[in-house]
Image: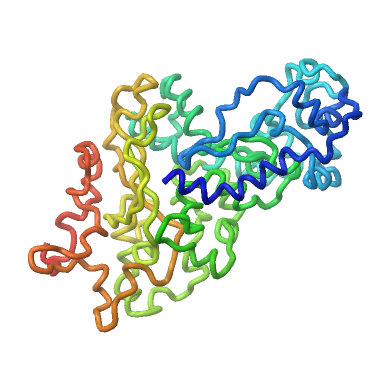
Amino acid sequence: MKKVILTSLMGMLLVLLVSCSDTSNNDPNANVATCEGCHTNYDHLKLVASADTSAGGSSCGGETPHYEPYDRVHLGGTGWEEFKKTDHYKIGCVGCHNGVGNSSDKKVAHGSDFLAHPTKEFADTKCKSCHEEAVTRHKNSLHQMGWGQKRKVCLRSGLNSANEFSQLSESVKAGYEYNCAKCHASTCGDCHVTRPKAQGGGLMSGHKFAEKPDMNNTCIGCHTSRGGHAFLGIAPGTQPDVHFSKQGFTCTNCHSKNEIHGTGQFVEQRYKYSELPKCKTCHAGLETKNQYHSVHYSSFSCNTCHSQDYNNCGSCHINGEGARIASYQDFKIALNPIKDAKPEFKYAVVRHTLMAPDSWALYGVAQLANFNALPVYNYATPHNTLRWTTRTKVDAGKACSDNCHIIKEGSTYRNKQWYLFDSDFKYDWERSSSKGITVDGKLPSSWGL
């Protein structure tokens, strides 16, 4: 499945590679004793490049094209020319990155106070002076702090909340930073200037700032294996999300900057965000839109009818062999696992997740202290919406429930595959952690189970 994802996304990633290594701005006579002179001189950058220490471009979506150290910092192409016309350019290199701006010696220029990623350490001072609201909101956001992923690690480690992350062992925190934080944390620059860390980092377009992050090169750079994979209809047998194929939507049509930047308040679960997009914002009157909505609106999340199959995987070994349950396409409906955040639904679509009791074994934790704190299936909102799906489209003359209700036919049960049963689990630890959301004994008695 990783190969499928990467093959489909390779075209858009190669666009970045070409623009990054574009040497049309290469001036062999440029004064390399200045920041701009050095970083616009591609040949000189290659000569003075240090050994590559980057962890590389990889994430749950697999490996991405490798960018050399000099490609990541080259100032060239149309993006660079456009950047020079902006107010950010007027600040000057040293104004954001510190260092020494008039030396041809790389060690001197990149002095002790040099900042390769200014927004990581000094967003509060360097960005906030002009972008106060955005920085204030983003400072405690899920995107910047990775609270959602930290929450899962903390709860399964026997702690009570994501804000107790600092209490984990130094080894686990280091493992989180090396593995999980490639995607589950971002700075201002990660969205507006550089490629995401999951793609190996580096300037995205000659240091040009993108006010609105580009869907393909930024959003999908991190949200590859799930959001992007589904939205673009990558998997065999699936179609692009109708909002993309029919409306031409990008991520920011639904996910506003206020949601992405956060509220400034601590929220450890994305479904608790006050700015979360809602279907009814655009689709008013859903409750009584048709007979199916009238019956099921308060019982099922919209995705249970209008999503296609989506990516799942499981049992990850952090920094080791990766997902021991390989990526696969599936669809499961379970009891709503987050009633506190989404109390309106009894049933919801769920996705098989990565964590296993020994996921952190290579970081000194043989078995997580409280693995059963969370089920191995998460509440899911697959971004692959269609009006007519396998469950909503029935053959002529058939009842509307023919493809979604479990129907007994002789000694077998049709449509049972849509629901999460105790018997679906491969491992006992999956079953024990998820017993609160399986549908065994919870479905209508008329279905004859």
Residue 410 appears left or right of 282: left
Residue 373 appears left or right of 255: left
The structure residue drawn at horizontal position 60% and vertical position 39%, both measured from the top left corner, is 196
Q: Nearer the viewer, residue 197 or 379?
A: 197
Give the vertical position of 173 relative to 384 (above or below): above
- Where residue 193 appears, as percent x and y from the top left, is 69, 41
Q: Nearer the viewer, residue 261 or 97?
A: 97
The structure residue drawn at horizontal position 80% and vertical position 16%, both measured from the top left corner, is 108
Q: Nearer the viewer, residue 23 or 422?
A: 23
In which image quadrant can residue 293 be found? bottom left
The structure residue drawn at horizontal position 29% and vertical position 74%, both measured from the top left corner, is 295
Give the vertical position of 123 relative to 98 (above or below): below
In which image quadrant can residue 34 be found? top right
Give the vertical position of 309 relative to 288 (above or below): above
Give the residue furthest to the bottom. Answer: 397
Q: Quadrant of the C terminus?
A: bottom left
The structure residue drawn at horizontal position 39% and vertical position 74%, both measured from the top left corner, is 287
How many numbered marks does the figure carry? 0
- Where residue 354 appears, as percent x and y from the top left, is 36, 39
- Where residue 312 appears, as percent x and y from the top left, is 36, 47
Coloring scheme of the render? rainbow
- Where residue 436 appears, as percent x and y from the top left, is 23, 47
Give the residue furthest to the left. Answer: 411
In which image quadrant can residue 310 be found? bottom left
